Each structure stands twice: as structure tokens, then as C-alpha cells.
Image: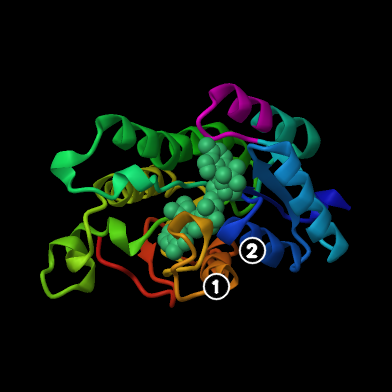
Amino acid sequence: MAETKKIALVTGANKGIGFEIARQLGQQGIIILLGVRDQGRGEAAVQQLQAEGCEVSSVALDVTDQASINAAAAFIDSTYGRLDILVNNAGISIPAGRVASGELDINVLRAVYETNVFGAFAVTKAMLPLLKRSEAGRIVNMSSEMGSLSMQSDQASPISQLPPLLAYNSSKTVLNALTVAFANELRTTAVKINSVSPGFCATDLNGRRGFLSAEEGAKAVVPFALLPTDGPTGGFFSREGNPLPW
Ligand SMILES: NC(=O)c1ccc[n+]([C@@H]2O[C@H](COP(=O)([O-])OP(=O)(O)OC[C@H]3O[C@@H](n4cnc5c(N)ncnc54)[C@H](OP(=O)(O)O)[C@@H]3O)[C@@H](O)[C@H]2O)c1
């Protein structure tokens, strides 16, 4: 009955918020493809979700590797012929990026952009023809309030007082720019794309310092993967579902 069920691809889904998004979408009867760059870690995640009753498999997908992106798109095309949901979740923050901007190694900046920006762009571009074949294609970009230029430049905002994190923060700013650009170009189609901030979640990305669980973060994201026809596109939303300033 695969033709009547929605199909979702979540990148970087073997752990953290991506894994929880996959689980929550799987619990709704959606066919889940876990995009994973390590087959061993991916298989462990697949087995866990299958044991919980989810219809799930993994697809090799390193978002910094165009050949792996092309292969994943070809696999989805030949297996399902379309894609209903893409969650651009894969993301990194490198410890060497937690330095003053004047001290930041340009290779660290490049590495963070390679995954968080160019990776999300390349996956979106490759999956777009499949998403356009869906009756209601949905793309969610995993963003962050740390990428909000308005909040960073507002001295009254706690975001402006955080230690420097230029590479990660600006990568999410550019990710938001992708959201706006694609949304404007897709307004005449059934595809919607939004940026969502899951809140500060305890994951490996931040040494588990977040005050929310990955499960709580995922709960903020899932509604944007399942937006109704009259839902928003081209927006940036908080974990409560409220618009955030760019
Ligand atoms: N945690 C937070 O508080 C928070 C807040 C706002 C936004 N976010 C965003 O939420 C997303 C998920 O973060 P998280 O906190 O769940 O982090 P995480 O636990 O570190 O998980 C990151 C996931 O991305 C994967 N990944 C990294 N590089 C990849 C690549 N090149 N190709 C494919 N997969 C790759 C990782 O795979 P491996 O296991 O193979 O490394 C892992 O599955 C990120 O985009 C992050 O920026 C997180």
C-alpha cells in the first residue's frame, strides 16, 4: 500500500533530533527513509524504529557528497517515484568554531557551510523533482534562533549576548535565505518550505547542554512536515510555532 502512504526523507537521522523526527513521523504511518552517512549507525536506528512498529529503512546519504545525494535521489525515484517530505536536518557545529570571529579558521567556516548550507542546498535541489510529484510536498529546514540577524543585532536579546559562533550562526542565516528563495520560486506549486527552530535540545551537537530533549525538539518540527494546504511557506518559526524575526 506504499502508494497511499506518505514518504519522508530525514537527513542525519541516525541520532538526535533527526532520529526523533523520523520516529514521530513513523508513528503517524508515514514511510520513513533515514538518511545516514554511516551504515552501521543507520542500521541500529532502523532496527530500533522497526521494533517500535515504524515502516522504516535507511538510505546512504552524506550531504557533503554529491554522488551519494544523486544515488539517494535515484533510489527514491526508482522505489517510490516521488517524495512527500524532506527534512534537511543534518547539521554540524565544530568545537574549533567556538572562537572570536577574528580568530576563526576559514577552513572551519568552510566545513560548517559544507554541511549546513551547501549540503541542505544540494539535497533540496536533488529531491525537488520528486517533491514536485507529491500532492503536497513539504520541506523543513532545521534552523536556529542563532541564525536570526534581528535577534543577534538586538542588544536586548539574549542571543546577542552569547559567545561568538560565527560559522554555525551564519550557516543558519544562509539556510534561512535558502528557505525564502525556494519558497518564492515554489509558490505556484504544491511544495511548501519553512525554517524551524527546534529550541535548545540536549544532543551531541552541543555536548548535551540543551534544556529540551531531542523528542521535544522534534515535536516542534513535525507539524511543519505535515502542513495542510493552507499552511505557511517561506517562514521562520519558533518551537512554539510562532514566526521568528529573520
Ligand atoms: N540541538 C540543538 O539545540 C539544535 C538547535 C537548533 C537547531 N539544531 C539543528 O538540528 C539539526 C540536528 O541537530 P542535533 O542537535 O540533533 O545534532 P546531532 O545529534 O549531532 O545529530 C546530527 C546528525 O547529522 C548527521 N550529519 C552530520 N554531518 C552529516 C553529513 N555530512 N551527512 C549526513 N549526515 C550528517 C549526524 O550523523 P553522524 O552520526 O554520522 O555524525 C547526525 O545524525 C542540526 O541541523 C542542528 O543545527 C539543533
- Residue drawn at the location 55% of the way across and 63% of the way down: 229
Q: Is residue 174 visible?
A: no
Secondary element under disc 2, as helix, strand or loop, is helix
**Colour scheme shown:** rainbow
- Which callout, 1 or 2, points at the residue further toward the start of the chain? 2
Report the front residue among 198 and 211.
Answer: 211
Give the residue number, with chain letter if any, for mark 1: 213
Specify few, some or many for label 1: CA neighbours under 10 Å numbering under 14, 14-19, or 20 or more: some
Report the front residue among 115 and 130.
Answer: 115
Q: Which residues are magenta?
A: 61-72
Secondary element under disc 1, as helix, strand or loop, is loop
Give the residue number, with chain letter if any, for mark 2: 20
Q: CA distance from mark 1 to mark 2?
A: 10 Å
Disc nearest the viewer among 1 and 2: 1
Asked if residue 57 is positioned above or below residue 210 in the image, the reply reads above
Q: Amino acid at mark 2?
A: Glu
Report whether 171 appears left or right of 187: left
Cβ atoms under marks 1 and 2 closer than 8 Å: yes
Q: Amino acid at mark 1?
A: Ser
Asked if residue 96 is positioned above or below residue 141 in the image, the reply reads above
Rendering quarter of residue 83: top right
Report whether 103 appears left or right of 52: left
Q: Which numbered dot is residue 158?
A: none
- Residue drawn at the location 43% of the way across and 77% of the way down: 240
Measured from the top left, where is residue 143 in percent x and y? 40, 56
Report whether 121 appears left or right of 9: left
Measured from the top left, where is residue 140 in percent x and y? 50, 55
